[in-house]
Amino acid sequence: QVQLVESGGGLVQPGGSLRLSCAASGGIFSIDAMGWYRQAPEKERELVARIISGGSTEYADSVKGRFTISRDNAKNTVYLQMNSLKPEDTAVYYCNMEIKVYRFLAAKSYWGKGTLVTVSS
């Protein structure tokens, strides 16, 4: 059973930094894309950053230049380094991975339970 577990959320002052981690475990053959999404109160979930197996990345315009996504394939882990945090970055951050459990099956999307990031003075 594949599981994704996030860590690293918390309370930080504006201008501060946090690093989120998400580790996948279970019967994993390979992981295609890894990403971070967030959902603020009364708003829809939105893509924050995504990285594919080849290393290409994409970012939401609102976080470009401040956030950096990276992955460690050996550890089945994705990271999100968040710098220069703003109050509007406050949200629950969710990890998402497209995982193959067998070589000849299509990848399936898996989600973590989320970690709360609060940016406030």
Image (spheres, rainbow, N blue to C red):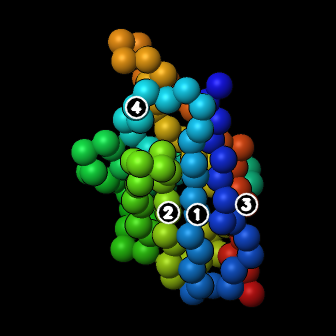
**SS class of the residue under badge 3?**
strand
Q: Depth-wise, is mark 4 or mark 1 nearer the camera? A: 4
Q: Residue at x 26, y 51 (%)?
A: 56
User: Between disc 4 and disc 3, whose residue precedes?
Assistant: 4
User: Between disc 2 and disc 3, whose residue precedes?
Assistant: 2
| Quadrant the C terminus occupies | bottom right
Q: Which residue is mark 3?
A: 116
**Numbered label attached to residue 20:** 1
**Numbered label attached to residue 80:** 2
Q: Position of residue 8 (x, y in %)?
A: 66, 65
> Which amino acid, mark 3?
Leu
For mark 4, does the 10 Å Cα neighbourhood hold few (<14), some (14 to 19), or many (20 or more) residues?
some
**Numbered label attached to residue 30:** 4
Name the foreground residue: 70 vs 90.
70
Q: Position of residue 49 (x, y in %)?
A: 43, 54
Q: Residue at x 39, y 39 (%)?
A: 33
Name the foreground residue: 97 vs 89.
97
Q: Position of residue 53 (x, y in %)?
A: 31, 42
> Which amino acid, mark 1?
Leu
Tell me whether circle 2 and circle 1 mark residues in contact (CB < 8 Å). Answer: yes
Question: Farthest residue toward the top?
Answer: 104
